[in-house]
Image: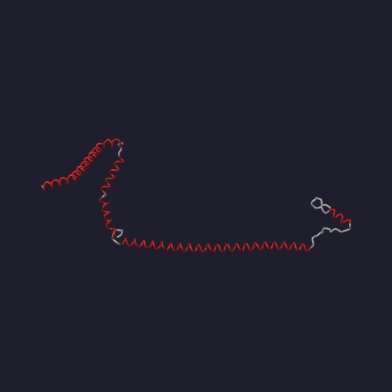
Amino acid sequence: MQPAGGGANPFAHILAVAQQTGIALPQPATSVPPLIKSTKSLVGAAEAHAAVLARVQGLRALKGAHSATDVLKQQDLCKLLQLANTNNKAIVLGQQEIAARVRTLKSRECIPVERHQQQQFVALLHAVFQSGPLLRQLYEDIAWAISATDPGSVWEDRLQPLLAALASCLAYEAALMQQEEALARVAPVVAGAAAGGMAT
């Protein structure tokens, strides 16, 4: 007897001896018994039911998780909305306060600065008005320098005498200062000598 796989059957000798002794060998069933068929169908139905049940449980869990997530998101959005409303109210109140202060300043005939700084502000305005001619002259000088077409070397030659005169003036001023310092050192000595001569 050859097995279904085509290889040698290790029980072939035992089966041959059993046939010689008259032992009837069991024959393979030609059809599956109804009980086994029903069992197979029940097993298949149970597997399908288990798969459907697992699917339903998974969908329920997924639905519950989504609902919880949506609730948390809505709570966070509510908190953000409340915070935004609070900030908006604060901004509106600040704008109203600024508008009220501006209206108050416009209604009063005064300088729009703090009361304890109005004198300094007036002095600053006077200084600005007084420096107007000087600023205008400075602007005209700058405009003239920009529009000048002469090269810089020409002005350098023209400024050399002025620089020499300025150096002489500075040297003369330094000599005067040294003379004053020398006189300041000599004055006490002269005063002391005069006092000693008068005492003798």
In the picture, measured across the screen, residue 79 lies left or right of residue 173, that is right
Residue visible at 30% across and 41% down in the picture:
145
State the residue lying farthest toward the front.
200
x and y percent of residue 104 in the render?
A: 32, 62
At 26% from the left edge and 55% from the top edge, which residue is drawn?
Answer: 123
User: Which residue, as the protein is rendered here, is positioned at the far right?
Assistant: 21
The x, y position of residue 188, in whole percent, is 17, 47
Residue 163 to residue 23: above or below:
above
Residue 53 at x, y percent in the picture: 66, 63
Q: Quadrant of residue 44?
A: bottom right
Vertical position of residue 173 compared to residue 62: above or below: above
> What kind of colouring is applied to the model shown?
secondary structure
- The reply, left or right, for residue 196 in relation to residue 85 is left
Q: Is residue 42 above or below residue 182?
A: below
Q: How many marks?
A: 0
Q: Nearer the viewer, residue 73 or 15?
A: 15
Q: Position of residue 110 (x, y in %)?
A: 28, 60
Q: Nearer the viewer, residue 144 or 153?
A: 153
Nearer-the-camera pick, 163 or 62: 163
Against 191, is 19 above or below?
A: below
Relative horizontal placement of residue 33, taking residue 115 as reference (left or right): right
Q: Write down the quadrant of residue 101 in the picture.
A: bottom left
Residue ID at (41%, 63%): 90
